Image: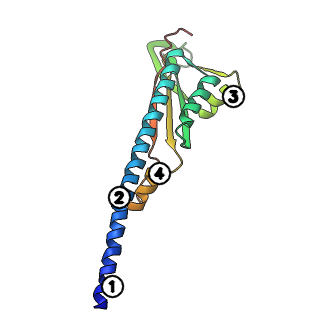
């Protein structure tokens, strides 16, 4: 009779553990993943608004960037923000037949981009003039990803250990159109 009682208590313990997992862990996991999705959407919306403003105006000011950082900070994620500016450079193509002849313009113009990253852009904003300017045809983009582990990531790691650290990642950019004529 006693062996049956021990088996019954083991079954009840297993049943209680299953109930805890089903009624508490899965809803918490759902909440964590939903929060990550909402955070991703907020970061995407703020980044889109900031980049589109920069593309339209043709420059970034220190106050514009600080306002963007304040908006992103409301999500309470610790993230890496990478700024990239691809400056459009045009160079006429010349042909040289011999060393004595003057170069002859071929009629072609070569296009290429010089890249500037967060270090140069933020240096101009915080240590330079406070404004970083772009030209028409340049390309500006932001890549932001979380460094801190979110609740959804922590809970997913309890189920599957092969979950990447960055679950919130936004990359957005485009050509500078400078419609305001600044």
Q: Which quadrant is the C terminus positioned in?
A: top right
Against 89, residue 16 (above or below) is below
The residue shown at (64%, 30%) is 122
Instruction: Give the label, 1 or 4, closer to the camera.
Output: 1
The residue labelled by disc 1 is 6
Query: In the rendered image, which quarter is residue 82 located in?
Result: top right
Residue 126 is labelled as 3
Q: Nearer the viewer, mark 3 or mark 2?
A: 2
Label 3–label 2 contact, CB within 8 A: no
* Mark 1 surroundings within 10 Å by alpha-carbon count, few (fewer than 14), some (14 through 19), many (20 or more): few
Which residue is nearer to you in this view: 72 or 135? 72
Instruction: Work out which residue is located at the far right of the displayed protein and give it.
Output: 127
Q: Earlier in the sequence, mark 1 or mark 4?
A: 1
| Residue holding disc 2 | 23
Judging by the rendered image, the residue that carries numbered circle 4 is: 151
Counting residues from the start of the chain, the first of labels 3 and 2 encountered is 2
Circle 4 packing at 10 Å, graded few (<14), some (14-19), many (20+), is some
Using a 10 Å C-alpha cutoff, classify the residue at mark 3 as few (fewer than 14 neighbours), some (14 to 19) or many (20 or more). few
């Amino acid at each position: 009779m006693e062996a049956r009682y021990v088996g019954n208590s083991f079954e009840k313990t297993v049943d209680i553990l299953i109930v805890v997992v089903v009624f508490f862990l899965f809803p918490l996991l759902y909440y964590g993943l939903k929060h990550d999705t909402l955070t991703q959407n907020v970061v995407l919306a703020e980044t889109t608004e900031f980049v589109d403003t920069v593309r339209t105006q043709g420059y970034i000011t220190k106050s514009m960037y600080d306002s963007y950082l304040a908006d992103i900070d409301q999500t309470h994620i610790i993230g890496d923000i990478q700024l990239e500016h691809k400056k459009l450079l045009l160079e006429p193509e010349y042909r040289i037949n011999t060393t004595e002849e003057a170069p002859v313009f071929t009629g072609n113009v070569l296009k290429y981009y010089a890249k500037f990253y967060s270090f140069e852009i933020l240096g101009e904003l915080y240590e330079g003039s406070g404004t970083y300017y772009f030209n028409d045809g340049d390309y500006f983009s932001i890549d932001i990803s979380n460094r801190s582990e979110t609740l959804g990531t922590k809970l997913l790691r309890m189920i599957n250990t092969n979950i990447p650290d960055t679950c919130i990642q936004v990359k957005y950019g485009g050509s500078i159109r400078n419609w305001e004529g600044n």
